[in-house]
Image: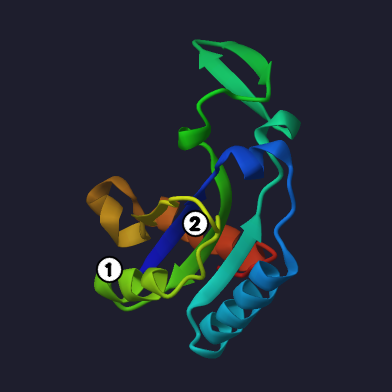
Amino acid sequence: MRFMILIKADSNSESGAMPEERLLTDMGKFNEELVKAGVMLAGEGLHPSSKGARVKFSGSTRTVIDGPFTETKELIAGFWLWQVKSRDEAIEWVKRIPNPMPGTETEVELRQVFEAEDFGDALTPELRDQEQRLRASSPSGR
């Protein structure tokens, strides 16, 4: 099972404030544990929404909306992609994360990633083959 672990933004991350050395050290150690356990597939921090954009789809029209975005509690400051045996295992790993926003109340969200078998018959053999070819040719090989 794969899970996306989402670190919610706060006013500090949205202001572009960089984490202190202690947090970087603690996160580095935690990431090493994830890699050694074969759990971590990817993980990165994100620039503030002021450097981002959204594209709104309305029929065939596309509208670009430049950041910053106002609802800080709805924004993402970073993420991990983990491979684990169960939701419970993912939760246990999340409980061990060093607080990504020291001094504030922080929320971390877990979302399971869809796998090919989740789509049932709608994912035809041709679409399954295409999915496998794309994964094999992607830089991550996943």
User: Residue 125: x and y, percent?
Assistant: 37, 56
Residue ID at (41%, 51%): 107
Q: Which mark is residue 131?
A: 2
Judge from the rendering whether residue 46 lies leftward or rightward of residue 110; answer left or right.
right
> How would you rate the neighbour count of disc 2 (Cα within 10 Å): few for under 14, some for 14-19, many for 20 or more?
few
Q: How is the image coloured?
A: rainbow
Q: Nearer the viewer, residue 119 or 67?
A: 67
- Residue 53 vertical position relative to residue 12 in the rendered view, above or below: above
Q: Is residue 119 above or below residue 82?
A: above
Q: Report the quarter where the C terminus lies.
A: bottom right
Q: What amino acid is at disc 1?
A: Arg
Label drawn at residue 87: 1
- Residue furthest to the front in view is 103
Horizontal side of 61 relative to 99 (left or right) equals right
Q: Residue at x 47, y 53 (%)?
A: 6
Figure label count: 2
Task: Compare marks 2 and 1 and give the one earlier in the sequence.
Answer: 1
